[in-house]
Image: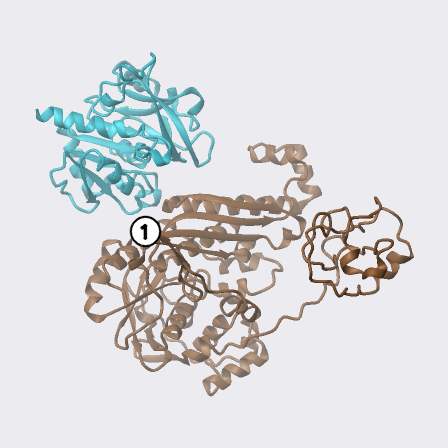
Amino acid sequence: MPVSGTPVPEYTPTVEDALALGLTRAEYELVCEKQGGAPNQVELAMYSLLWSEHCAYKHSKKLLRTLPTEGAHMVMGPGENAGAVDVGGGLVCAFKVESHNHPSAVEPFQGAATGVGGILRDIFAIGARPIAVLDSLRFGEVAGAGEADRGAQGGGGNAATTAERQRSPSKSRSLYLLDGAVSGIAHYGNSIGVPTVGGEVYFEAPYEHNCLVNAMALGLAPRERLVRSAAAGPGNVLVLFGASTGRDGIGGASVLASAELAEGDDKRPSVQVGDPFEEKKLMECSLELLARGLLVSLQDLGAAGLTSAAAEMASKGEVGLDIDVLRVPLREPGLEPFEIMVSESQERMLCVVAPGDLQDVLGLCEKWEVNGSAIGAVTASERLRVFAGERIVGDMPVRALVDDCPLYDLSPSPPAVRSIPRPRPCSRRAPGWRRRFWRFWPRPISPRAGRSSSTTTRSCSRAPCAGPSRPTRPCSSCPRPPLRGTRRRGMQGRGMRRRGTRER
Amino acid sequence: MRFGVLQFPGSCDEVDALGAARRVGDAELLWHGERDLRGVDAVIVPGGFSYGDYLRAGAIARFAPVMDAVIEFAREGGLVLGICNGFQVLCEAHLLPGALLPNANRRFTFRQVQLEVVQGDTPFTSACLPSATGGVGGPQTLSIPAKHSWGRYYADDPTLDRLEADGQVVLRYAPADNFNGSLRDIAGVCNAAGNVFGLMPHPEHAVDPLTGSTDGLCIFESMRLAIEGARV
């Protein structure tokens, strides 16, 4: 049942508000240019999310574009909710992996659970039924005194465990993150009936302050059930279905996913809360809508909620969208328009429906008890317009929101303090003058560099240098001296041969 | 022979139950909101997380409109099979005695278990007894996967004594396989009249050689024999 948003006095945000939302000064000025004036609260909130690192990949997109995107069996490539390949027999396998690191570092159970929820939605958003979940995890060291920790997990608190925790609070925190993340993944996947079939986990000190939680999902679909996310057909209806919209997760993309982790506690309201039962109903409803051919396009709501789903659908379809936030089913009264647009409440989908199919779509949503609501329409304007009833509260060009986000080049530099120790030198002998010389002088490239020989081996017997080498390249962590008697024939190629190597 | 497989919001294993039943007869889904069983010969209450296991597993499904029809069907002697969450629903509906508690190991566990057929004289296990060539004495064991976190069968001692005396204990876990701590290793029980049967492991996942065991098929086969035998 839609609840009216209370009217709010008009407030024009300043550049300070923009900075607080994660935009730079230059980006704010670019927004003003695109808008033809200072953006209002709704518009600034939407730009700050869509131009955040998480949504726009502004520091990595240039690099990502260098990766291959074509293949003989590829059915759906980059740009859609998930990738899909033909596996024969008229079937397509869809899969995707996504990180949910920062929410998991703040609230591991819900962070990991909603990571699984999000990746499952991406799979059925293209029309595939999820059949498996996997995860790739990294945490800080958890086993200081292994037995004491296992004893603690078994439910007994004992002196050794307490002492261990006092000595290393970081290990307790890593254990807490591990337990929470694993429980969250299990809880969400099992409740929907999708098994977690595999994964990997590593424990190393550098991950202590920045754990990694990557969730992957796999799905199967008959090829004809696949659907894309581009909005199309001016006059078509925009339907939102799934859970109602609340205040959970507001700012998750701009505040949490895109920011550096400092003290995590005050970011807890930005962590989304998941309900796998709601998602199970959502999944069955989505797949049945697609099986019955009732949808023009489908998109799941993830980071940045309605803002990113609507903007991306419009951008891909090169159309505009009008959205009335008063038609969005709300979980609590009094949400302001910008809150409704940026809420990251989970388990919601957005679809485009031909007007003639609207009643059937809403009927199916009612059957599955998933709150279907017509909240807007597709237009030809290429603008994303947000209304609160009759009142327009936001008006942005779609291209500016999605395509015109500035992209940056990375300029990496070594950290001031190394977080992991420098590897030990490979040579067992005390460095002689040759080693000192080559440590501080770049190695010349022999004319024969680049021609790899199958017998070429590194001169050093310690890992990671040991073993047959790939095309000759200096080992960056090891100042290897040239071998005796080889200088005349060029450093790189001959210097690698093990023949004539003296045992070190 | 027509099976009806219930479908609640949150049911996961109704699809495999449908598939297993279709290997021995016809089968269709019965929506939770409708009180009509459409004249099926047997009802299967499938596994999953009906209503998200909110409140207690099966506690809300027990009140679904379709369950009114199932309770009446059972009272008139119709065959009802409850698997995993279905077993929980039947206990909540008091069609079966006892209750299912959290696993003793406090974890969701998914593993293959060996089940001893203790009572072969039911419409659900008549086809599960050792054949003349296969049996080597002792109860037949079925290799069936189990996957649950609330599967510890519990009833008070007088009830358990009565169940054992009356032959209502149908399946027991093999000694090494009782990971959930069910009392007296009970894996499946039937009601006094013998027409309602519940078990925690999933026979519908053991009907195709592809998944390693076809031992679950005998339960559906037994039901078919019971219905078609009654018609003769």
Question: Is residue A94 rendered to the left or right of residue B123?
Answer: right
Instruction: Report x, y in % for residue A145.
Output: 67, 36
> Can you say whether A226 is above or below B101 in the image?
below
Circle 1 is placed at which residue position? A89
Q: Amino acid at mark 1?
A: Gly
Can you tell which chain is drawn brown? A
Task: Identify the element where label 1 is drawn.
Answer: loop
Chain B color in figure: cyan
Above-or-below relation of A12 to A134: below
Residue A53 vs residue B100: left or right?
A: right
Q: Is residue A274 above or below residue A316?
A: above
Task: Return the residue nearer the eye: A334 or B20.
Answer: B20
Point out the image quarter for the N terminus of chain A. Answer: bottom left
Residue at 34% x, 39% y is: B56
Q: Residue A452: x, y in percent? A: 68, 57
* Of A445 and A331, the residue lying toward us: A445
Within the image, what quadrant is residue B218 found in? top left
Q: Residue at x 20, y 24 (%)?
A: B123
Q: Residue furthest right?
A: A433
**Would you identify the image quadrant in which residue A148 lies?**
top right
Badge 1: chain ID? A
x 29%, y 55%: residue? A287
* Tag count: 1
Residue B111 can be seen in this image: yes
* Residue B60 appears in view: no
| Residue A333 percent across, percent down from the top left | 35, 64
